[in-house]
Amino acid sequence: MAKKSVASLQTGSKRLSKAIKMVKSPKTGSYTFVESIMAPEQVNDFLAKK
């Protein structure tokens, strides 16, 4: 998890954030990107999870 990117999105009255993190595959050792759109309060929990 070497990369951290967070973009702020606004749709109507809701504020959302898009978080992208790199996850290393245990089988092949290659990295993949996992993207998720969520409330800004949940971003730190998403990036802290493995």
Image: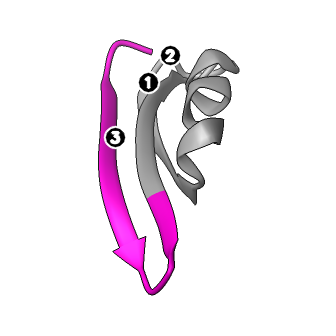
In magenta, the rendered stretch is 1-16
Front residue (pair 30, 16): 16
- Kindly identify which residue carries mark 1: 30
* Nearer to me, 8 or 32: 8
Secondary structure of residue under mark 3: strand
Please name the residue shown 42% across and 27% down the image: 31
Which amino acid type corresponds to the residue marked 1 in the rendered image? Ser
Secondary element under disc 1, as helix, strand or loop, is loop
How many discs mark residues in the rendered view? 3
Labelled disc at residue 18: none
Find the distance from the CA under tag 1 to the CA under tag 3. Answer: 22 Å
Q: Dot 2: within a 10 Å radius of its alpha carbon, few (fewer than 14), some, or many (20 or more) residues?
A: few
Give the image's coloring scheme: one colour
Residue carrying label 3:
6
**Callout in the foreground (3, 2):** 3
- Position of 49 compared to 28: left or right? right
Which residue is the site of mark 2?
29
Above/below status of 47 relative to 20:
above
Toward which corner of the image does residue 21 lie, by quadrant? top left
Q: Quadrant of the C terminus?
A: top right
Quarter of the figure that contains the N terminus: top left
Horizontal side of residue 32 vs 45, given as left or right: left
Q: Position of residue 39 (x, y in %)?
A: 59, 53
Tell me which numbered mark, 3 or 2, is placed earlier along the sequence.
3
Distance from label 3 to label 2 (Cα)? Answer: 24 Å
Mark 2 near mark 1, Cβ–Cβ under 8 Å? yes
Q: Amino acid at mark 3?
A: Val
Q: Residue furthest front?
A: 13
The span from disc 2 to disc 1 (Cα, nearest Å) is 4 Å
Q: Residue at x 53, y 45 (%)?
A: 40
- Asked where in the image residue 38 lies, by quadrant, the reply is bottom right
